[in-house]
Amino acid sequence: MLNNCMICPRNCKVNRVNGQKGYCRLDDKMKIALASIHKFEEPCVSGKEGSGTIFFSNCNLKCIYCQNYEISQENVGKEVSVERLAEIMIEQQSRNVNNINLVTPTMYVYQIIDSIKIAKEKGLKIPIIYNSNGYENVDTIKMLNGYIDVYLPDLKYYLDDIAIKYSDAPNYFNVATKAIKEMYNQVGKAKFDERGIIQKGVIIRHLILPNHIQNTKHILKWIKDNFEDDVFVSIMAQYFPTYKAIDDDLINRKLSIREYREIENYIFELNLQNGYMQDLGNHEEEYVPKFDLSNL
């Protein structure tokens, strides 16, 4: 399928097998920047033991505020084979993590499916999380049916103008919401083990952007109107200006307390039942991983 790549909504139709590169600047090789134990995901994902994250390089978005821009935009990473990715999953499991957390995996879905097959043959048993920016083709998500236990998509934008301005992602809301509905169709109601660690389900993430509170309200209202309470919501307040966002007059600062309280109050107004709202902190920069190719 990489001969005519339509793995994401860009539908570049390039022949990645022959070395052609589309929007994501990738051929058919798989690149990873870090395999680590992440203890700062949602409580039901990390728990005490941590989440076995695998950070993939490159991206099909160009978010000007990306906290992981070194790997998403600057191509930092190491090429690995399908077999090696399977080994990394098994190695992560041996570190007693709660799950395998595939971060920004979209461009590598075909290879990832093959790696999961190999890893399961070698004893992989813990849940697999698909941690995505939400800009997904429904057909690609359908291919993952039976391989993914937990979907952890972003739902970044309601308004098309800011989706284009900040991520070069036209039609983001329509694309992402269709993909998220397919994710829910596959895995259904959230299920947890006796420790409260998620085993199956969907957690929709949304990052609040400064000066764009109405965008967040639209997103939360859509979630409330379209899902039962068995879909979890994770509202993230960790935004800090980085990469190209430092030059943007609207998002070149952190969230204000007023903005945070306004969204907090709106959550109660909507009566959203299940999920998390991240505390407003002072040192968000410290939680960005060091992409040093560890454990690859």
Image (cartoon, rainbow, N blue to C red):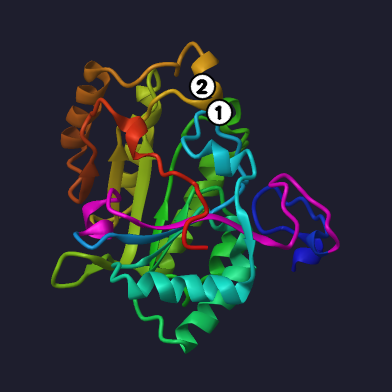
Q: Is residue 230 visible?
A: no
Residue 270 part of the magenta segment: no
Disc 1 packing (10 Å; few <14; some 14–19; many ≥20): many
Tell me if residue 203 comes above or below residue 169 in the rendering.
below
Farthest-out residue, right: 18
Residue at 34% x, 39% y: name it. Answer: 287
Horizontal and vertical percent for residue 115? 56, 75
Which range is magenta? 18-47
Horizontal and vertical percent for residue 263? 25, 28
Farthest-out residue, top: 249
* Marks 1 & 2, CB-CB < 8 Å contact: yes
Residue at 63% x, 33% y: name it. Answer: 168
Dot 1 amino acid type = Ile
Q: Secondary structure at mark 2?
A: helix
- Say which residue label 1 marks: 64
- Say which residue label 2 marks: 245
Compute the Cα span from label 1 to label 2. Answer: 5 Å
Residue at 79% x, 50% y: name it. Answer: 21
Q: Is residue 86 visible?
A: yes
Residue at 54% x, 14% y: name it. Answer: 247
Disc 2 packing (10 Å; few <14; some 14–19; many ≥20): some
Tell me if residue 172 comes above or below residue 138 in the rendering.
above
Horizontal and vertical percent for residue 230? 25, 59
Horizontal and vertical percent for residue 204? 36, 50
Q: Nearer the viewer, residue 49 or 135?
A: 49
